[in-house]
């Protein structure tokens, strides 16, 4: 199988430079319209698709992002691997604004997101024990080192509902739980990427100290955007280096992200809902 990299841009990241044969493409899915058109092209010879999570101009709040349509559209275009870029607050003294974090665990505190592509008529249970792909993550970490970024590899992301930022009591509680960064989108996306059998890595840019830190004020959007803009060139440097590290002829994922559904489907074939089966034409094409 040919490797194709999907990049989901977070707050402050609405486009990507340097793509050859770049074109914005509208992709329809059975789950509705994705957040925006998708920019396709080639970077360093590798096919790539870029999707701004909140849409160009940041029109979608975290609960309104069409997570299922976004993942379906990237899979439908042929993406095998997804690098999700996000802005996060830091829940650790040593994760400072401007640092990057390779997230490998999530705690989900969101309440209003569609949790699955599956449901009544076709039930599936995939493993989320390790919700990100270690192979893709290692390549992202290597690209980060080559680009000179400060990267903390391995961290737990608290995925809150928002859109308001946390209270101080919540922020302190999340720290006590062992969460290390906080955002509003991460897990809603990661869980669906696993169901879609996509390798998924999460690169978080620390933009603030949330509100727990006694010597920093409460977080606000202007501060977040300023830090994202100040570090956008570093993130671009990482992205520019990543295609050369990916094998264009995609070897099977050692963790099995690309086979996550193999032992996950529960519903007897004769009891499956044909309507839902049809909607899963891209997500579960390998098995249905
Ligand atoms: C602009 S601050 C809050 C906003 O930033 C993060 O976005 P993303 O994860 O898409 O980079 C956070 O999750 C909130 O959506
Ligand atoms: N402190 C914070 N809380 C939630 N989402 C964020 N995105 C950036 N900073 C954040």
Image (cartoon, rainbow, N blue to C red):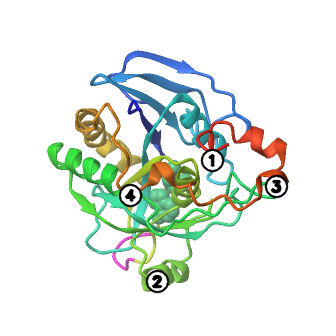
Which mark identifies residue 121? 3
What residue is rendered at 45% in x and 53% in y?
257
Determine whether, in the image, residue 144 is placed left or right of residue 9.
left
Which mark identifies residue 255? 4
Which mark identifies residue 67? 1
What residue is rendered at 74% in x and 40% in y?
279
Residue 211 x %, y %: 46, 73
Which quadrant would residue 285 be assigned to in this image?
top right
Which mark identifies residue 177? 2
Residue at far top of view:
21
Residue 169 x %, y %: 54, 83
Query: In what element is the residue under mark 2?
Result: helix
Query: In what element is the residue under mark 4?
Result: loop
User: Can residue 215 be found in the magenta stretch?
Assistant: yes
Q: Earlier in the sequence, mark 2 or mark 4?
A: 2
Q: Earlier in the sequence, mark 4 or mark 1?
A: 1
Residue count near mark 3 (Cα–Cα under 10 Å), binned few <14, some 14–19, many ≥20: some
Residue 45 x %, y %: 29, 22
**Main SS, magenta residues:** loop
Query: In what element is the residue under mark 1?
Result: helix
| Residue contact at pointers 3 and 2, CB within 8 angstroms | no
User: Does residue 222 appear in this view?
Assistant: no
For residue 202, above or below residue 279:
below
| Residue contact at pointers 1 and 3, CB within 8 angstroms | no
The span from disc 2 to disc 4 (Cα, nearest Å) is 27 Å
Q: Nearer the viewer, residue 21 or 123?
A: 123
Mark 1 or 3, closer to the camera:
3
Magenta segment = 213-217
Which mark identifies residue 175? none
């Amino acid at each position: 199988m040919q490797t194709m990299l999907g990049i989901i841009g977070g707050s402050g990241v609405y486009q990507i430079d340097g793509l050859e044969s770049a074109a914005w493409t509208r992709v329809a899915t059975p789950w509705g319209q994705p957040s925006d058109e998708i920019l396709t092209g080639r970077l360093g010879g590798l096919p790539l698709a870029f999707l701004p999570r909140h849409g160009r101009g940041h029109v979608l709040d975290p609960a309104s992002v069409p997570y299922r349509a976004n993942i379906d559209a990237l899979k439908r275009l042929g993406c095998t691997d997804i690098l999700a870029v996000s802005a996060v607050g830091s829940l650790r003294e040593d994760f400072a604004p401007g640092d990057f974090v390779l997230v490998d665990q999530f705690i989900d505190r969101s309440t209003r997101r569609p949790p699955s592509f599956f449901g009544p008529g076709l039930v599936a249970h995939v493993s989320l024990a390790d919700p990100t792909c270690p192979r893709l993550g290692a390549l992202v970490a290597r690209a980060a080192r080559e680009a000179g970024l400060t990267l903390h590899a391995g961290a737990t992301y608290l995925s809150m509902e928002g859109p308001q930022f946390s209270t101080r009591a919540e922020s302190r509680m999340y720290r006590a739980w062992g969460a290390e960064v906080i955002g509003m989108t991460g897990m809603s996306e990661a869980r669906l990427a696993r169901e879609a059998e996509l390798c998924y890595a999460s690169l978080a840019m620390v933009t603030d100290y949330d509100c727990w830190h006694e010597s920093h004020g409460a977080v606000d959007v202007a501060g977040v955007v300023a830090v994202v803009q100040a570090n956008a060139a570093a993130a671009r440097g990482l992205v520019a280096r990543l295609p050369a590290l990916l094998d264009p002829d995609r070897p099977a994922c050692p963790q099995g992200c690309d086979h996550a559904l193999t032992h996950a489907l529960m519903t007897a074939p004769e009891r499956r809902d044909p309507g839902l089966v049809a909607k899963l034409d891209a997500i579960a094409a390998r098995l249905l």
